[in-house]
Image (tube, helix red, strand yellow):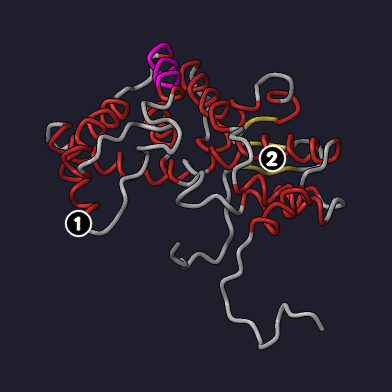
Amino acid sequence: MKIGKVTVPRTAICTSDEHTIVVRGRDLSKELIGKVSFVEHFFLLLNGRMPSTGEMAVLNATLVAIAEHGLVPSVQAARMTFAAAPDAMQGAVAAGILGCGSVVLGSSETAGRMYAEIDAQVQAGKHVADAALAVMQAWRAAGRSIPGYGHPLHKERDERVGALFDVARAAGTDLRFVAIAEAAESLLPEVLKKDLRLNVSGAIPAVLLGAGFPVQALKGVPILARTAGLIAHMVEEIQQPIGFALSYQATRDMVYDGEVPAGFGSPP
């Protein structure tokens, strides 16, 4: 992010006085609390307007789709952190969220940026398949991975992909990014010499970008969704602790392959 020349901090998100808290131009207590859902509020905070019914349905579906994914590395990190510091749930949740990178949780943003590049060429008059091929070949030539495709478990299409696309179709939101995602999927054997299928990280930006969601905020969806899952894991960790068990299993299965001093391991 470039450092600008602005010397006066400005925000259009929130302000308050002695009597009123204002969020995006609305009275929080009178217009929002008890009147809108959290998903609507999240959309309002990001975009400065309330979502349509379709936009809300799509955003809600993506949050549900990505909230929980089992004992993935970010969850294990959070549970082991909580085992070591049970007085700081916020630290444990933060430990899990810090794992939101290009491999886990962050790939939705990268896929969305690729789709946006393809869409820019489509809007300039290029056929969607030609645009998808050109962008993916350029990414590969630059040494970049093609995000949003392939899954270690779901070799066919991840079932969440179809579910999210169905929500978007029923919601009546713009499906042009869904068409882009599917065009890219069909071209992967040519680009990568592999027949990889869409995964949930590719489906999320495909439906969100067509539902008025800004590409710059795409990583926020898995962060927000996974926070809910991490809190559930923290509560379960209180009730049924496994953090130290996870640590023990890592120690038990570890193989040391470094050097040792002379006599190491011999009886004293």
- Secondary structure under tag 2 reads helix
**Mark 1 Cα shell of 10 Å, populated few (<14), some (14-19), many (≥20):** few
Q: Is residue 165 magenta?
A: yes
| Residue at the bottom extreme of this rendering | 262
Image quarter where the C terminus lies is bottom right
**Mark 2 Cα shell of 10 Å, populated few (<14), some (14-19), many (≥20):** many
* Image x and y of residue 94, in percent: 68, 51
Residue 105, label in figure: none
* Image x and y of residue 42, in percent: 59, 33
Horizontal side of 258 relative to 181 (left or right) equals right
Q: Is residue 59 magenta?
A: no
Residue at position x 37%, y 26% from top? 157
Residue 230, label in figure: 2
Nearer to the camera, 186 or 106:
186
Amino acid type at circle 1 is: Ala
Instruction: Residue 121: tell me if it is visible.
Output: yes
**Span colored in magenta:** 162-170
Where 194 sits versus 264, above or below?
Answer: above
Horizontal side of 14 relative to 175 (left or right) equals right
Nearer to the camera, 15 or 157:
157
Residue at position x 55%, y 24% from top? 60
- Secondary structure under tag 1 reads helix
Image quarter where the N terminus lies is bottom left
Residue at position x 57%, y 76% from top? 258
Residue at position x 58%, y 42% from top? 223
Say which residue label 1 marks.
141
